[in-house]
Image (tube, helix red, strand yellow):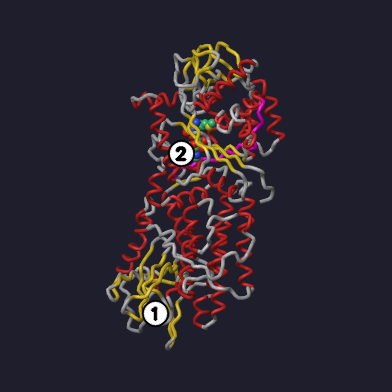
């Protein structure tokens, strides 16, 4: 990493407990977790804070609807967040609830201090109030008479309230943002805040709510007829949790925070309210506030009323925690919006995790088991191919090192996956199965050791994203200390020859697209259509032995990647293959056992007749036929040149 920070303190927004958590909450929290993990594995002291925002109108309204007290509402809902974080392998160091005394005390002390220093004053307010946003607006702020933030109807209000002198910090804040380019990220969000600050006079902030209207909040210490505005209360969690006004040593250790991670919906509160509050308190600014984009369903905003909100628990139950974490982090370019569909999820999972990474792991481990009795072999001299594949992996290491501070995790992950594909290619080139046939034991040892070393580094780089699976993989590679150290990935030869490897089982079993919402129609229709076409046109040759173009086209040829291969008991010539046809997985039985070992087939791209009627060979179902060329006693598979992947039409 370019400049190693002396500590890393990362926060998520604290979530409202008016409803159960959804994919948006999960995303911010997983992202913070991944960043925290990366820093921990670089040996940087790390503190990761998340929690719940338990006061305010939204929570009170939810409690009223549910017929329970606000405290009961909080106590019941907070569990759902905490349980979800546990399932998502979130490694937060602290979880703050704003109803805890440690937080309430600090909020009240801060209010008193600001009141004593005339940073807070009482005044009569006349204006407009949005219940949804819990914010006041002037007549000028409104858009066509409605809330400028959410478009809801606003209520006319006249009441006495307490105000924080936010307006006086306007010029200071503009200058601070301009002088500190990394303060608000991405840069276009800083411009958004500056645009807002430069075009409008910054008003003072109403920080109280009369109890006659809202009782669920922290009492103002200087006037108990009022409770504190929920945002003024909530933002303080970032400092109350790390010892502000209670534990000076701890506070010094962690503050200023390295990164407040937020969604773009809460930019103004974090980039205008919070810095001005801190300035008035005389507390240092956070180092950065990073606003990520939104997860949409397809292209539509997720909303309860549209019924398109993705429930993280459902996804985890179906596909596993690590895969869910991987998809969210790999798919979203930080700062921009991203789209979640189950189909996109399944396709990315199959290509990145099942095909590229999972297969590589199973190939390498099973060949070590087969050729070296489950012990890591002693490699010979490294040649050019070994240098090339290792260079590719080191490129991934460097890309990831840059990606973390630059918040470009998706590009870091792409680089790792490119490295994984590089290892797969390396295996194709070195072909350890052929080396074995030629009795080149040292060659096989070098190839498999190199592949295992490269895989070790990839597993380390992906560990922060998929801790459980990558720990399993590293353990399988025989690493005694399975937790990686990310600062030491340039070192070659870390795996110890002779150490036992083990098989982790299928790390990422393929998802059958037929079972995935949205993907089923496209998958099922295609083979059916071509089968129907094939039926229409009788594939009989003319008397001269010639067939028509249509008859050729009736044969649906496709590329397929071999995922698994095994012998069939009692059938010397047959192998059973599981192949990936791009949009579906099939089982084939092929008479090639005398020409190929199961190991050398895995990962190969072959050509398959995809619309052949299924048949049973020796009682084993075969759903297609692979093409091979034979001459005399020799037989070689038909493959395609280059790297087309599965599912390509062969014409
Ligand atoms: N309680 C406030 C935050 C106070 S922080 C001092 C709040 N809570 S919230 O429950 O509404 O959570 C908002 C956060 O959830 C967003 O900022 C974002 O991090 C996350 N998301 C909610 N929906 C989202 C998407 N559809 N996509 C991505 N993240 C979004 O606001």
Q: Are marks 1 and 2 in contact (CB under 8 Å)?
A: no
Q: Is residue 645 above or below residue 162?
A: below
Task: Answer above or below: position of 336 versus 542.
Answer: above
Per the image, the residue denoted by label 2 is: 301
In the visual, does 313 lie left or right of 454? left
**Residue 597 magenta:** no
Direction from residue 625 to residue 413 in the image, left or right: right
Alpha-carbon neighbours of circle 2 within 10 Å: few (<14), some, or many (≥20)? some
Q: Cβ(mark 1) to ligand 1 < 8 Å? A: no
**Residue 127 sits above or below residue 274 on the image:** above
Which residue is the extreme one toward the bottom?
Answer: 632
Quarter of the image for residue 11 reads top right
Where residue 139 appears, x then y in whole percent? 55, 18
- Magenta residues? 282-297
Res. 186 image quadrant: top right
Residue 206: quarter of image: top right
State how far apart marks 1 and 2 are (Cα).
53 Å
Earlier-in-chain disc, 1 versus 2: 2
Note whether residue 40 is visible: yes
CB of residue at label 2: within 8 Å of ligand 1? Answer: yes
Query: Label 1 belongs to which residue?
Result: 593
Instruction: Please name the residue shown 55% across and 40% down the image.
Output: 48
Residue 559: x percent and y percent?
Answer: 44, 68
């Amino acid at each position: 990493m370019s400049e190693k920070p002396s500590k890393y303190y990362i926060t998520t927004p604290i979530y409202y407990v008016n409803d159960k958590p959804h994919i948006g909450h999960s995303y911010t929290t997983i992202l913070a977790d991944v960043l925290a993990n990366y820093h921990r594995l670089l040996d940087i002291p790390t503190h990761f804070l998340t929690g719940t925002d338990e006061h305010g109108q939204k929570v009170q309204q939810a409690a009223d609807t549910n017929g329970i007290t606000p405290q009961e509402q909080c106590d019941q809902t907070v569990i759902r967040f905490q349980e979800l974080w546990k399932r998502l392998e979130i490694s937060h160091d602290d979880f703050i609830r704003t109803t805890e005394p440690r937080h309430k005390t600090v909020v009240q002390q801060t209010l008193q201090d600001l009141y004593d220093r005339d940073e807070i004053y009482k005044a009569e307010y006349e204006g407009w109030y949005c219940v949804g946003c819990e914010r006041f607006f002037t007549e000028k702020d409104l858009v066509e008479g409605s809330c400028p933030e959410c478009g809801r109807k606003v209520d006319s209000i006249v009441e006495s309230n307490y105000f924080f002198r936010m307006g006086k910090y306007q010029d200071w804040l503009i200058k601070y943002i301009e002088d500190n380019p990394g303060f608000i990220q991405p840069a276009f969000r800083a411009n958004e805040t500056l645009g807002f600050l430069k075009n409008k006079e910054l008003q003072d902030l109403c920080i109280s709510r009369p109890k006659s209207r809202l009782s669920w909040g922290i009492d103002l210490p200087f006037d108990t007829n009022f409770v504190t505005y929920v945002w003024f209360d909530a933002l303080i969690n970032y400092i109350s949790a790390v010892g502000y006004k209670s534990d000076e040593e701890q506070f010094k250790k962690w503050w200023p925070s390295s990164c407040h991670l937020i969604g773009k919906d809460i930019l103004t509160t974090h980039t205008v309210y919070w810095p001005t509050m801190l300035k008035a308190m005389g507390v240092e600014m956070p180092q950065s506030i990073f606003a990520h984009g939104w997860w949409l369903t397809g292209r539509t905003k997720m909303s309860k009323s549209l019924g398109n909100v993705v429930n993280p628990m459902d996804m985890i139950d179906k596909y596993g925690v690590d895969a869910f974490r991987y998809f969210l982090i790999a798919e979203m370019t930080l700062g921009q919006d991203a789209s979640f569909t189950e189909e996109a999820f399944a396709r990315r999972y199959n290509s990145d995790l099942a095909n590229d990474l999972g297969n590589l792991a199973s190939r390498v481990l099973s060949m070590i088991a087969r050729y070296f009795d489950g012990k890591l072999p002693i490699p010979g001299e490294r040649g050019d191919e070994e240098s090339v594949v290792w260079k590719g992996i080191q490129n991934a290491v460097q890309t990831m090192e840059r990606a973390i501070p630059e918040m470009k995790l998706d590009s870091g992950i792409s680089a790792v996956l490119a490295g994984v594909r590089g290892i797969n290619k390396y295996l194709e080139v070195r072909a350890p199965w052929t080396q074995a046939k030629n009795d080149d034991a040292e060659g096989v040892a070098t190839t498999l050791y190199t592949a295992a070393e490269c895989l070790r580094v990839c597993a380390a780089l992906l560990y922060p994203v998929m801790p459980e699976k990558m720990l399993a993989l590293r353990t399988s590679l025989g690493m005694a200390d399975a937790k990686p150290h990310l600062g030491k990935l340039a070192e070659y030869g870390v795996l110890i020859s002779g150490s036992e490897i083990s098989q982790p089982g299928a790390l990422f079993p393929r998802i059958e697209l037929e079972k995935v919402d949205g993907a089923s129609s496209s998958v099922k229709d295609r083979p059916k259509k071509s089968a129907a076409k094939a039926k229409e046109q009788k594939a009989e040759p003319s008397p001269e032995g010639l067939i028509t173009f249509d008859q050729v086209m009736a044969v649906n040829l496709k590329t397929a990647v071999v995922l698994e291969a095994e012998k069939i008991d009692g059938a010397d010539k047959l192998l059973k293959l599981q192949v990936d046809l791009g949009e579906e997985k099939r089982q084939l039985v092929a008479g090639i056992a005398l020409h190929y070992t199961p190991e050398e087939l895995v990962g190969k791209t072959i050509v398959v007749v995809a619309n052949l009627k299924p048949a049973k060979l020796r009682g084993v179902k075969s759903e297609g036929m692979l093409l091979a060329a034979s001459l005399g006693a020799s037989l070689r598979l038909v493959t395609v040149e280059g790297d087309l992947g599965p599912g390509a039409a062969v014409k």
